Amino acid sequence: MNTPDPFDTAALRAAVVGAWESSPTRFREDANAEEDLYLGGYRDRLLVELAQNAADAADEPGTLRVSLVDNELRAANTGHPLDAAGVAALTSLRASAKRGAGVGQFGIGFAAVLAVTDDPVVLSLNGGVRFSAEDTRAAVAGNPDLSARVAERSGRVPVLRLAWPVADAPPAGFATEVRLPLRSDVDGARLLADFAAQAVDLLLALPGLRRIEIADQVWERTDGDRVRVHGPDGVSTWLVHRVSGEFTDEVAGTLGVEARPLWMVCWALPVDEHNVPQPFGPDVLHAPTPTDDRLSLPARLIATLPIEPSRRRLRPGLAADAVLAEAARAYPALLSEIPVEHRTLLVPKAGFPLSEVDDRLRELVLSELRQAKWLPRAGTDKLIAPARARVVDADGLAELLSQVLPDLADLSDQRHAAALSALDVERIGLADVVESITGITRPPSWWRELYAALAPAVDTDPTARTELGGLPVPLADGRTLPGPRGTVLMDGDADLLDLLAHTEVGSLRVVHPEAAHPMLERLGAQRGGALDVLDGLQEAVERSMDDVESGVDIGGLVEVVLRLVRDAGVRVGERPWLGALALPDSVGDWRRADELALPGSPLLDVLDEDSPIGVLSSTLDWPESVLISLGVLDAFALVVDDAPTGPDHDLADEAQWWDEAPEPPHRLLAVRDLDLVTPDAWPRALRLLAAEPETWRALLEPRGYTGWWIARHGVIGGAAPTEWRMPDATELAGLYDVVPDLGLDPRVLTAIGVRAALVLDTPDDAEELLGRLGDLDRGIGTGAVLRAHAALAEAVLDETLDPADVRPPAGVRTLAGTVAQECSVLDAPWLLAVVAEDAVVSAGPDFALAEPLADLLDLPLASEEVGGEPSSTGEFVPWADLGAVAAACELLGVAVPDGGPIVHDKLIINCTDGDRPASWWVQDDVAHCEDTPQALARALAWTTDRWEDRHTLAELIEDPSNHLI
């Protein structure tokens, strides 16, 4: 039975075989061309070509079903059935039956089937055809030339040039089915798995296909505002933008007679449910099916581009240039569907191009993106082109700065940086931002938002702190400073902050509370409370007197300082410079705070009427404690310096005190204004000083200024404190009178110089004591005189006093209690036998003090003035032979000395002015004495260097039993 041949395949076979027989070379060319196609150009493109043919056959989006039946691959599609023109195209290596808007350009794509089979079959509703390598070899076997060609090719023949009719039909519901019996070396299951991996791409690339079925898996595309592909693994969502048009005659003329003059471009982008672009890995150019030209663009390009016969590479030329240009022009439209904060994901990133097409296409796309309006413009709902846009180097700034800096794009986040750089968008550095906003007026809250936006940059960019050094900072008083350094971020209650916000104080640098932000600290601002702000006003306080005298209104400054002193809890003297604040006095003038006293202050009662201390105006309604902390006086004020470097504290006679100190003071705690006390008020002044703990400590400060000054200039009972003695200092009786009873602690009296003992620290002290000794109006006991002279001599001996620094007195107190101008200093006890007591001065029984006392008083020693020697020879008697002497020594536990005295019955001393009787004498270190207990005792005491025991020795020599009584 003959198989129907609706497509007249017999005629087609005859024509082809005839051509081969007339030109065996043509046979070889066809065989080579077909082999090139399925071994090269169409290798691995089987599903692509089957899907392309299915899409071309569809009037409306159709279906492609691929299955494996008995090792036969079957691909059925809906749409138009195969017709004669289609069969002719299948048997041709160059001509194509596709016209109009079809995807394919050449019918040769069917050659891809030869990669898996030697016997392809195409079934359709209008009939079917089959191809067979074996039948083709049989058809040329009768021609020797062709048989030889087949033998040369090892049996390989051009399979798709000869078609035979077949009677089978496609499955129900389908117009065409391609059946491919697989060669034994083809893995059918692996083939289906490879097909499944291409399904989504094909549904995007081929609008004519709506559904692809591969074995038991189904992929289906639904169109709308977004394209969704439903598949076994879920749904993938794509934004798709398509444009199409017709080539110009010039471009169309380069395509050839068979080519269609139409072009189509489709951009496809994977997105999530919010239209946020999703990465999809390495991609290639789809023309419209995949080529080998790799692309790095964030979206997939599917376009009707001319490709090489191999269908693997773009064919350069005017048509390719035209379609790529149209694709680039269409690209910005894809961005309009993307949320503005994600649009930069579609900007081609910098880097090496993956292919020549990639390089060209990226340049075109970037050029179009630079000119298109798709960037969000800060401050408006409008868009701006990258070519005009600028961005700042910190996220969150664009909205704030949109009214200051025009054409700002609201995409400053670092994640946009690479994309904006690729578009050559101008970046505005932080230093430029500072320059642009300097001088503008904005509410404090705006500045805080600005600082908050800049904070991340300051934390992460080491150069940001330098660039933002001049960042404007609004202050609480309405001014704006260029730079945070030196400003204060204040912690305080609302009332204080409100006061600062409405008070103009030039040196106050408190950041406005509504603008305060921690970022300012990192740029040099200081965080602090009332005390920190107060310290910032030091210059203004110290200048306040000059300002008020120049007519400047300082009322605001006074109010702020008083409030800060109160809130900071400033203690008296803690900030001495506060005393310079100008305050109004009771007569309407302005004075320094530390030159004013509180109304009714007891201090006013002890100050001289010409004192510069005024009375504070009663109009200042502040607690006394605050005013006193400021420096206003309620009692004597203190000067405190924990590390003084010199006498520079404006204290009366401070330089003299400093010079007289044995070493520079390490700390200064002093009462000031002592020189303003009226003389008759010193008792009350002292009671005031003793009543306050601070001034009490200053009074008792060791070697302190306060006690030093009062000792010299204070007045008690009409005299200086140093002219009085304490009641219990009886050893000073006669020299100093007892201090009047002032009701003061004895420690205060001694601290201000009232004498508790005889102290000689300075030449003045020595001169003052000598003056008192030489005052005949003073009834001074002999003991007090001797102690005074001894103290003077000891001061010289230990070098406390230098005789050269002490003026000798006009008269000195003698042993007789008289005052003499010419006398000598007693330097040996036996001399009293020949010298009158009113002619000598004595330092007491310690005769070693005679010489330093003589130097101090500028007097000769008595031994230098008086000459004499015993008139008789006497008798030498060893001490040991004197029984009473030996017994006395034994009772005292003293060894009997060697040698002995010269004993005289009656001792007479021959002197220059006559003979003088004496009980004992020392001549040339030899003792002379009469044989009496008193004389022997004095000679023995002097010889044994026990002069202080002379009276005891005398009693024991006279009667040893006196030892017991």
Image (cartoon, helix red, strand yellow):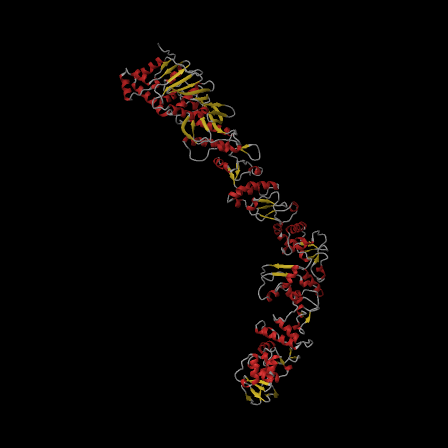
Looking at the rendering, which quadrant does residue 475 occupy? top right
Residue 338 in picture, x, y percent from top left:
52, 30
**Residue 262 higher or lower than 462, as above or below:** above
Q: Nearer the viewer, residue 845 or 691?
A: 845
Would residue 403 be found to the left or right of residue 114 on screen? right
**Residue 443 higher or lower than 145, as above or below:** below
Would residue 603 be found to the left or right of residue 663 on screen? right
- How many discs appear? 0
**Residue 417 higher or lower than 475, as above or below:** above
Q: Quadrant of the N terminus?
A: top left
**Residue 81 higher or lower than 774, as above or below:** above
Q: Quadrant of the C terminus?
A: bottom right
Looking at the rendering, which quadrant does residue 720 occupy? bottom right
Residue 896 in picture, x, y percent from top left:
54, 82
Residue 316 visible in the shown view: no
Residue 627 visible in the shown view: yes
Residue 522 in picture, x, y percent from top left:
55, 46
Would residue 727 be found to the left or right of residue 29 on screen? right
